[in-house]
Image (spheres, grey):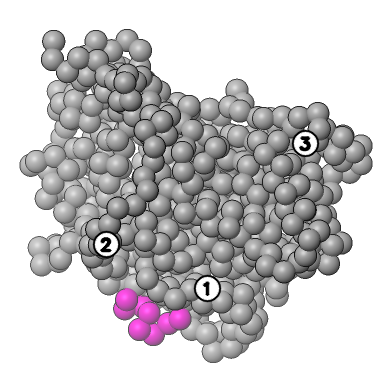
Amino acid sequence: MNKISKQEVEHVAKLARLHLTEEEAERYTRDLNDILKFAAQLDEVDTSNVKPTSHAFDVRNVMREDVNRPSVSNEEALKNAPDQEEGQFKVPAVFE
Amino acid sequence: MLLTKKRVSLKYQPYLNNERKGETKVSLFDKRLSELHDDLKKKELSVTDLTVASLARIREVDKKVQATLLVDEEAAMEQAKALDERLAKGTEELGLLFGLPAGLKDNMVTKGLKTTCASKLLSNYDPIYDGTVSQKLKEADALVFAKLNMDEFAMGGSNENSSFYPTRNPWNLDYVPGGSSGGSAAAMAAREFYFTLGSDTGGSIRQPAAFCGVVGLKPTYGRVSRFGLVAYASSLDQIGPITKNVEDAAYVLQAISGHDGMDSTSADVEVPDFLSALTGDVKGLRIAVPKELIGEGISTEVRDAVLAALKQLESMGATWSEVSMPHTKYAVPAYYLLASSEASSNLARFDGVRYGVRADNAENLLDLYMESRSQGFGPEVKRRIMLGTYALSSGYYDAFYKKAQQMRTLIIQDFQEIYENFDVILHPTTPSTAFKIGEKIDDPIQMFVEDICTVTVNLAGLPAISVPCGFSKEGLPIGMQLVGKAFDEGTILRVAHAYEQAVNLSPKKPELGKGEA
């Protein structure tokens, strides 16, 4: 059984774009280890010849006609924007 | 803290004042939705009557139950007035849900009504569109003015993960209402609305319905559009009704079902007449009872209540046999890996850029993402995002995500084998009755294993209904679950309805006196 270290938890948090406090990092290390131990039950079953299922029923791509349709207005699209400028979403600098 | 309660303006104040002088018309909530529809048509009742009763009831009891996050009284009265004006002009072409005040779980996008998912991160989100279900309610002439409490982003089984306040169980305010649609189930049990909607990813409609003594229906995956349902685990999520009785569930399901071009997983299948399925006849019905969900791990009181229900159905002409679903034990770990993986991907969109609450101390873009998410998400949401991110990360994908997907295949096969010889599967909705607020909050695994009776159904995409089937010694409701074949909601509704009519449990209502809160 894999054991996940605090360093790995901090790495996963970074991938998930979460900033953990010291306390959270410790808590989640403990929790994730408990959960992974719980999940290890799955290894009791040999699934080497079993096809994985992503959806209970078959799902296929659904296409619509490629035609112009009305869309939301610029004002509507920006209605919930935390910050905006000249009709666009505004964010802090990407590069320092 | 109450999020937003928009009090009614002076114009409508007299209506509510009149109502408050007398007894709140709780009796209106006892009527079946189809009866209310007829009463409205015969003009024995106005939409304003129904609406005022609902608003007065919310004012009276929701301080205790805390099931609502947002109630726009003014919008409710405006809608009622407009519908009454239509009624005065003629009773032709009234929508199926004409004049019925509805409560929606707060993960359903509603134009002009804030949609928060009970998360700090979305506490200011004011949608510019209606999700399909909200749209369908409006087209059916229901009143949409209230949003209901839930576990944040539908993650949890107790409503304790709401970022705002926990909902309480109307049968005993010290107990949880279940979750994640705890607000929807508690509001229905407390008779604040005529019906409510919840969403179910791993039991989130059925478990709170069982805990609160009401009916909860999870339709077949694809039966109801997910467009405008804030996604938790897209391959499992499904919207469904929570009602006081089975007929109402059929009634509401009729109005919200159907293929939708806006949801590519929406099923292009015919929607049958669900009400006509309620024949009361269960003669010759073959019921399967999985031994894994009636034996060890199920409390004696719950087991006894479900066995009594089986006896009842037997006396009405059904037969039942014990069967085995050998992979049941693995459903909970498989579910948590899959749901968390999908969640980690779905919740990546909440980055503080286009909507939601942005952290104000960010120095650069990465910082903005990290801080907005870290400050906005609660502990359970973070835990599942972390678990999902880990399960999907390179090197662990096969061991966790793929393994869980393979288990999903085996669980689906368990169901297929049973349905070769049986019409429905019956077992408890929950291993035990509602637990106390705070009792399990610190132990995620203990909270997970509670879901053993519900998650298999989501993994297989099947329809299932929870129906009240008794009470514990402490006076807490017990629910039993009927699981049907894909797109055969008719059969589970028929059996649930026949049982409910025979035992006549549903009129029992909580008194809202029990508990400290």
Q: Which mark is residue A65?
A: 2
Circle count: 3
Report the quarter where the C terminus of chain B lies.
top right
Mark 2 vs mark 3, CA separation in Å: 51 Å
Identity of the amino acid at label 2? Glu
Report the quarter where the N terminus of chain B lies.
top right
Q: Nearer the viewer, residue B177 or A57?
A: A57
Residue B225 appearing in the image: yes
Instruction: Locate residue A1: give its quadrant.
Output: top left
Report x, y in % for residue B265: 32, 61
Find numbered disc 1 in the image and state the secondary structure of the residue it sits on: helix
Tell me which residue sits at (77%, 53%) in the image. B85
A9 relative to B384, above or below: above
Identity of the amino acid at label 1? Ile
Q: Which residue is mark 3?
A: B60
Report x, y in % for residue B89: 78, 61
User: Relative to residue B335, is residue B30 drawn left or right?
Assistant: right
Identity of the amino acid at label 3? Glu
Q: Which residue is mark 1?
A: B492
User: Relative to residue B95, is residue B150 drawn left or right?
Assistant: left
Tell me which residue sits at (72%, 53%) in the image. B83
Mark 1 vs mark 3, CA separation in Å: 35 Å
A58 relative to B212, above or below: below
> Is tag 1's residue or tag 3's residue first in the polypeptide sequence?
3
What subunit carries mark 1?
B
Q: Write down the region rendered in magenta.
A: B416-423
